């Protein structure tokens, strides 16, 4: 079996308020854009370059739906998805998006003025809890290296 990895981690600012819809099978889909910025030296001067990502998340809690607002800082972890389609003129087009698996708000305020970073209900995630049977070594002498 071949091994592969499709993982992306981003920290950026939401570019537009999230749009929410529900599929016929009652799956909630939230879509928004995220901007990341990096600095690069051009002609002796440092300039900021921005990269935009389309983000799609499924079945988010109401907290996230209400707080995925333009300008908010957000950590997104997920996978890259590339879809292809043919437009009305018969031209093949490609659409790249990030399918979010984990979201963590990084702003200290939300739409609710009483909100603080420690108040949010945790990261929106589909990951499972660690194995109950795992016990880390008690001291360094137990390590095999």
Image (tube, rainbow, N blue to C red):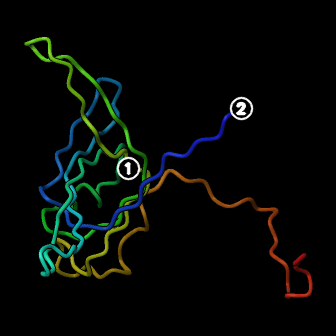
Percent position of residue 66, x then y: 21, 59
Which residue: 36% across, 72% down?
Answer: 120
Q: Where is residue 38 shown, x and y percent of the image?
A: 24, 71
**Up-down relation of residue 118 to residue 38 (above or below):** below
For residue 20, what is the image quadrant?
top left
Element carrying mark 1: strand
Which corner quadrant holds the C terminus?
bottom right
The residue singled out by tag 2 in the image is: 1
SS class of the residue under badge 2?
loop
Residue with the mark numbered 1: 100
**Image position of 70 (left or right of 141):** left
**Residue 95, image quadrant:** top left
116 to the left or right of 78: left
From the viewer's perspective, is 3 left or right of 21? right
Characterize the local packing of mark 2: few (<14), some (14-19) or many (20 or more) Cα atoms within 10 angstroms.
few
Which residue is drawn at the image coordinates 86% and 88% (left, top)? 139
The x and y percentages for residue 118 are 38, 81
Q: Residue furthest front?
A: 43
User: Which residue appears at 41% of the width and 60% of the height?
Assistant: 9
């Amino acid at each position: 079996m071949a091994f592969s990895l499709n993982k992306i981690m981003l920290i950026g600012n939401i570019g537009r308020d999230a749009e929410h819809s529900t599929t016929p099978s009652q799956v909630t889909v939230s879509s928004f854009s995220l901007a990341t910025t990096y600095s690069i030296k051009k002609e002796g001067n440092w300039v900021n370059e921005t990269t935009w990502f389309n983000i799609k998340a499924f079945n988010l809690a109401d907290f996230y739906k209400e707080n995925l607002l333009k300008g908010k800082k957000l950590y997104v972890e997920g996978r890259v998805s590339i879809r292809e389609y043919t437009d009305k003129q018969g031209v093949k087009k490609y659409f790249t998006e990030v399918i979010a698996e984990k979201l963590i708000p990084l702003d200290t305020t939300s739409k609710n003025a009483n909100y603080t970073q420690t108040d949010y209900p945790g990261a929106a995630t589909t990951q499972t809890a660690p194995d109950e049977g795992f016990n880390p070594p008690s001291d360094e002498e137990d390590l095999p290296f």
